[in-house]
Image: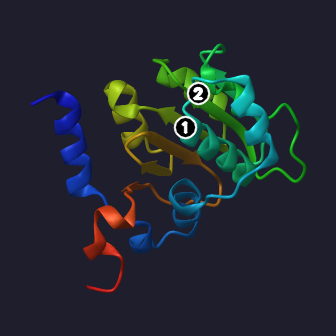
Amino acid sequence: MSSKLISYLKFYWNATTVYHLQAPMASDIAQIVLNDHRWYYIFDEIKTLSGKMDHPKGRKLFRLLQYFKPNSITIHPENSEFQVYLPKIKFQNSSFENFIFVDSEMDFTEIKKIIGNNGVMILNNPYNKSDLQNQLKEDKDIQLTLNFHYFLIGVRHSNLLEKQHFDVIDFWKKPWKIGLFV
């Protein structure tokens, strides 16, 4: 069996649905990643600019940016194809200082410096970067981690008091975990 299949099966076994998340911020983020299908005008422009883009992931990234409203946005590497989904505007009333999107290997201490005290980190394809994924999930300074198997989101915020980690999957992949059955 391939390592990708084994890693997905481990993820699937531990995963819960959005309906089992009790933490408000975790639930909000999971709703955006899994259930938000709003169409923004920018998506039409991006579709014409880049024909080979993985549009669903890029759209999720854009929606997450609308939720977090960071002061600064960093992408690694700088020439990532996801660059087109990152707005060049400053958000008003931002709730997070820094946002970093990591699409390739990067030093974890460097990531922590960029995130600061109120920041968000999104790791694209975390199972290709297992060392970085494990460091992010185990670090006590990153209070909330959400693993969607194709994205790993780490949040460091002053409102979060204790470390929490969730593996989250679409509810239709685990219909017995929609919250109706205990």
Q: Say which of 138 and 99 sits in front.
A: 99
**Which numbered dot is residue 21?**
none
The C terminus - image quarter: bottom left
**Residue to which mark 2 is pinned:** 53
Q: Residue placed at 42% from the left, 32% from the top? A: 125
- SS of the residue under disc 1: strand
N-term-proximal mark, 2 vs 1: 2
Name the spot of residue 7 as percent of width and height, x first: 22, 38
**Which numbered dot is residue 122?**
1
Q: Name the kind of residue labelled 2 in the image.
A: Met
| Left or right placement of residue 53 versus residue 45 in this view | left
Residue 4 visible in rendering: yes
| Left or right placement of residue 66 versus residue 110 in this view | right
Name the spot of residue 131 as percent of width and height, x first: 33, 25
Q: Say which of 138 and 88 sits in front.
A: 88
Q: Residue placed at 48% from the left, 19% from the top? A: 104
**What is the spatial separation of the Cα atoms under label 2 and label 1, in whole angstroms?**
18 Å
